Image: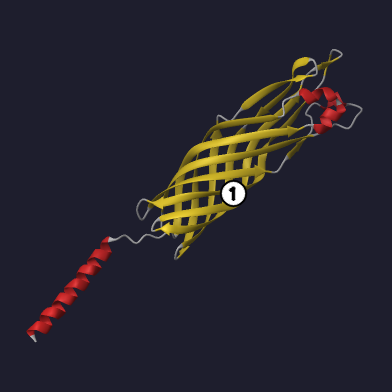
Amino acid sequence: MARKLLLSGAAWAAMAGGAGAADLVPVWSWSGLYLGLNGGFANYRSEVDFGAVASFDAGIANGPTKSSKTGGLIGGQVGYNWQLRKVVFGIEGDGDFLFALSKTMQGGYGPTPGGATLSSNAMGFTSIRGRLGLDVFDGTMIYGTAGVGWLNVNNNWTVNTLNGGVPKGGNFLANKWQPAFVAGAGIETMIDSRWSMRGEVLWAFPESIEAGPTDPHYFDGSPAPTVNHLTDAVLGRISVNYKIW
């Protein structure tokens, strides 16, 4: 009897010890509401298709057409995750201020230097995206994301040469929050049950912007042509998130 009691006591002690050790291992979940801050870089590319203007006056064909500039970004995000075993579903909204992305390019107009100018700038980005991830290790997730966004663009293609001593030209201006398709991927890891860090890359591809001249007097007597501004942006971000609950 004493031997049985001793063995039973040892078994209970082993079970209690195992439970105590298990309690020391954190059980982390991605589920919950979170908010955070991000920073990184953005590459903004702009291209103008001025085919209609070129057909009106072929000399414009020597003007600049493409611009690319890399700068910084800073912003924040808020989202919610649901975890089902190893699969994580989520939705996230974010906003970023973009800086140092302004660029101006000067081009010729026939024999005249400086006759056409392309200036491009992107100043802000915001999006609402879904996320689908896989917890590949306990607390480390790889994910893909896609949704809709808006890119604040400020582009201007200007024709400012002289024709027979008469100023001619126009600013073909695109200054607006432009809707965009947004997609990307990233990796996120938990620091503890509340804090996490991630690195991700997003691609924003807005619709083209059709712009007419702000100085239409140059085109008096003819239908004023339009140009198309084509833009996209690649964003690389490091984020820190805090899970509220």
Residue drawn at x 78%, y 31% is 50
The x, y position of residue 17, in whole percent, is: 20, 68
Say above or below: 70 vs 81: above
In this picture, residue 43 sits left or right of residue 169: left
Which quarter shows the N terminus? bottom left
Q: Is residue 234 above or below residue 117?
A: below
194 lies left or right of 214: left
Q: Secondary structure at mark 1?
A: strand
Quadrant for residue 10, please give it: bottom left
Residue 39 vs residue 145, the one in the foreground: 145
Figure label count: 1
Q: What colour scheme was applied to this rendering of the protein?
A: secondary structure
Residue located beneath label 1 in the image:
183
The residue at the point 82 percent across, 20 percent down is 168
Q: Quadrant of the C terminus?
A: bottom left
The residue furthest top is 165
Say which residue appears at 67% left-offset and 43% top-offset: 206
Where residue 228 appears, x then y in whole percent? 75, 36
* Position of residue 219 measured from the top left corner of the image (x, y, whole percent): 86, 26
Packing grade of label 1 (10 A; few <14, some 14-19, many >=20) is many
* Kind of residue at badge 1: Ala
- Residue furthest to the bottom in view is 1
Residue 72 in percent (x, y) is at 52, 33
Quick one: 56 or 245, which is closer to the camera? 56
Q: Residue furthest right?
A: 221
